[in-house]
Image (cartoon, helix red, strand yellow):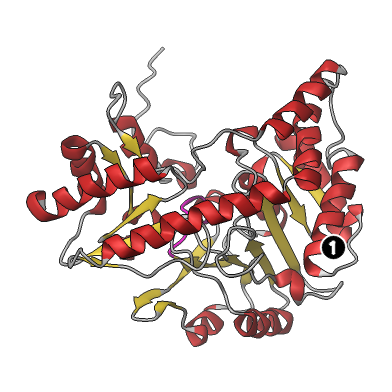
Amino acid sequence: MNHNIGPGITGIRKEIEDLSFSPIREIVRSAAGRNDVIPFWFGEPDVSTPDFIRNAAKDSLDRGETFYAPNSGIMLLREAIADYMNGLYGKQLSPSNITVSASGMNALMIVAETLIRPGSRVVVLAPSWPNIPAVQEILGAEIIRVSMSLQDQGWGLDMDRLMDACDSNTSAIVINSPNNPSGWMMKTEDQQALLERARQLGTWIVSDEVYARITYGSDRATSFCDLTEEEDRIIVVNSFSKSWAMTGWRLGWITAPANLESQFEKLTEYNIAGPPPFVQHAGITALKEGESFIRESRMRYQKRRDRLGEWVKSQPRLVYASPEAAFYAFFEIRDATNSLGMAKDLLRKKGIGLAPGCAFGPEYDSFLRLCIATSEERLESGLERLGEWLKNDH
């Protein structure tokens, strides 16, 4: 059997054949076999999941809870999520508004499978986590990118351009706020304006809010949950990965109008048939006992953010805006292009792994992303190496 499947082989959907591999994963693969690399490439905390969450999963395993779970999630977790969301946003959500998913990524795919018509438009803000437009491309949508720009006062969104990009053939508007990679947060008045536009068009808004609790200067991010009414076409995607340091657990949830729950339930059956019950029990404990961990993590990330901001002042080649939320530094290198080449050069010469800006949109090919959810020692060592590279090697 020939395993070397090359371009043009028949029987593969063109959308899949044309789909790009993640440039971030390409950098990671380039580091295979090296033990001297400081990894800033992935978006995850560098600490293990807290003991109290891990112990909840162990207890569930000890109780023998290893069988299939309901497709929409075990009721105890759906109730806990509804209580959590109601406490944050002052809503009156019920478990029928909640679908448990195997990660935020799985949630985005299920939502897209529900909403996206092949050939329709999906409006996506950029810079964007690469998986967001990829999901829409897999389902045959036309991606309309509305690019934000790095300005003196931070990242700027042209609301007129965003409004004009939405038309009657738009299946969904996908917003990632707080934003990966920029740390930008959408203002409440802009959320309200976009909601009014979506109401006029009958278009869905899909709001990826997985960094909602990693904010600086507030306990939570602005959210479409603050504005939505029961009849609004708003879907909010969340994840346990970032706020509770549970990236490897693959657990998330969808908040949506109750009449969508049965649709998501069907798609969960045909995708994964639900996350493992012991992982879901860990999620319940994370929600009920994890607030102090979230606060401590936020303080730690803020210190790293502030330290990086001070360091950037000594680097005349960098253009940077301090993030309002999330745990990334997304900076531009003046007079530079080919971010993938830069990331590979940094890895080869200095042993630091950064994410290339092209992963977040072709217009950001002079940018690099550094995850600051790391220790003080690791950050200092990485910044020293990066500074040497900026001065001597590029």
In the image: residue 388, left or right of residue 223 = left
Q: Residue furthest top?
A: 1
Residue 40 seen in the current view = no
Q: Position of residue 52 (x, y in %)?
A: 73, 33
Which residue is located at x 31 percent, y 38 percent? 27
Residue 268 is one of the magenta-drawn residues: no
Q: Give the residues drawn in magenta, as a range.
A: 127-132
Quick one: SS at disc 1? helix
Which residue is located at x 69 percent, y 73 percent? 203
Q: Position of residue 149 (x, y in %)?
A: 37, 75
In the image: residue 249, left or right of residue 274 = left
Residue type at tag 1:
Asn
Residue count near mark 1 (Cα–Cα under 10 Å), binned few <14, some 14–19, many ≥20: some
Q: Position of residue 139 (x, y in %)?
A: 58, 51
Q: Main secondary structure of the magenta part?
A: loop
Q: Quadrant of the N terminus?
A: top left
The part of the image, by quadrant, that contains residue 114 is: bottom right
Residue, disc 1: 86
